[in-house]
Image: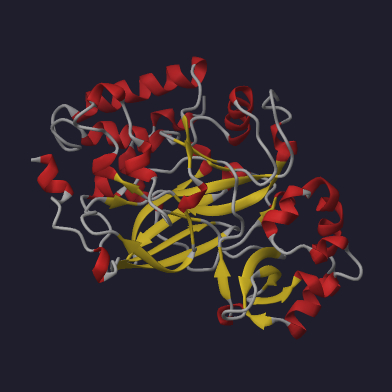
Amino acid sequence: MAAHWKADTAEMASRGGFDSDGDAAPAGIVLAQASRGDSESMPWLVANGRALPLREWADEWPFGRTGSLTELLEHWPDHESGLRDLTTRSQTRDLILARGDDIGSLLVRPPMRPRQMFCAIGNYVRQVVEAAADAGDGADGPGAPARRASALEALHRRGRTGEPYVCLTSSERVGSPIGNLSIAPGVETLDWEVEIAVVFGAPARRISPGTAASVIAGYCVANDLTVRSRVVREDLPSLGSDWIQSKGMPGSLPLGPWFVPAWQVPDPPRLRLQLSVNGIVMQNDTAEDMLFGIEHQIAYLARHTSLRPGDVLCTGSPAGFGVHHGRFLAAGDVVTAQVSGLGEQRLVCVAEELPEARVAPRQATEKEHMR
């Protein structure tokens, strides 16, 4: 186990705020699914704030004729080598910079629409310890040190002999990485979870952690938004977590903006995840704090189900959830989520407006249900 087992979640405050030097920006040429206004959405190559449609290279490369990144990923083994060649050429970058659209003028959509999506739960050490410390008499209470120590011991034991905890979630949750985030009426505990999303580029079934990297096509930024008060069903507490009512909302998993091929991410554990609300840093840690690394998670999934190209695994979220900070998302909040080298999301929270004809009689809010 890594030395961070002895780290205390109080270190979060000392690890600094958001980088101001643009570390979230990818170093290489990445891909996006975007459109000019209301025109047809298509794959684009993006470099230094400018973008050209992938079809610009259709005469030379067959993948230039694909209509979406989802389609491209379905045939990733056929296209990976050519796409790597194209995106590492200096001439490709020069052409994008000379002829490309300003990325700010495009409507950037989620990079793909996965058939299957998975979310790792409780996979960052400091986040689990932080949650344990916050329980009972609180992080500053006399019982907090014992809860921290107990949580660390349990994590150490689980890391040696246990397995990842992963839930299957709906692809209907995939939402835009840029723009508005609608909050439904009665939702008062919408929480954030910035994550590294792994995108699969090959089928996988019963593979080992040592070969798991071979099925990764690339990575994206994800924010696994969760209605925190709905995770546990008060009417059925013995049945555990209810991921439908807490994580099932359409648009509650913003993905992107970029798809970053795996060859541009040589050391995933060193990626830094950061999230701010209205400019205030809430989450800030690296993937080195994962309890189970990405390859271990993939091997676990492939042991229990079949993975297909285009499937997505969200690999867990670091300490600093809203429930820890004592605040949740509300209309007017601006949420910025980034991962170093993978890009940055920026969403403005707005109150969802239902058509007047569909307005139902007033329902109790979450807090009223909890009383």
Give the residue displayed 50% in from the left and 14% down from the top: 161
Quarter location, residue 59: bottom right
Picture residue at 56% right of the left edge, 56% below the top: 340
Q: Where's the C terminus, which quadrant?
A: top left
Above or below for 207 versus 294: above
- Left or right: residue 347 compared with residue 189: right
User: What colour scheme was applied to this rendering of the protein?
Assistant: secondary structure
Depicted 282 relative to depicted 231: above or below: below
Residue 134: image quadrant is top left
Q: Position of residue 370 (x, y in %)?
A: 13, 40
Q: Is residue 198 visible?
A: yes
Q: Which residue occupies the extreme front position in the image?
A: 357
* Residue 288, percent from left and from top: 53, 39
- Judged from this view, the residue extending furthest toward the right is 60
Front residue of this view, candidates 352 and 336: 352
**In this rendering, would 43 be left or right of 142?**
right
Q: Quadrant of residue 202?
A: top right
Residue at 56% of width from left, 47% of height from top? Answer: 197
The image shows residue 187 at horizontal and vertical percentages of 24, 54
| In this rendering, position of residue 275 left or right of residue 325 | right
- In the rendered image, the vertical position of residue 349 relative to residue 156, given as above or below: below
Q: Position of residue 368 (x, y in %)?
A: 10, 47
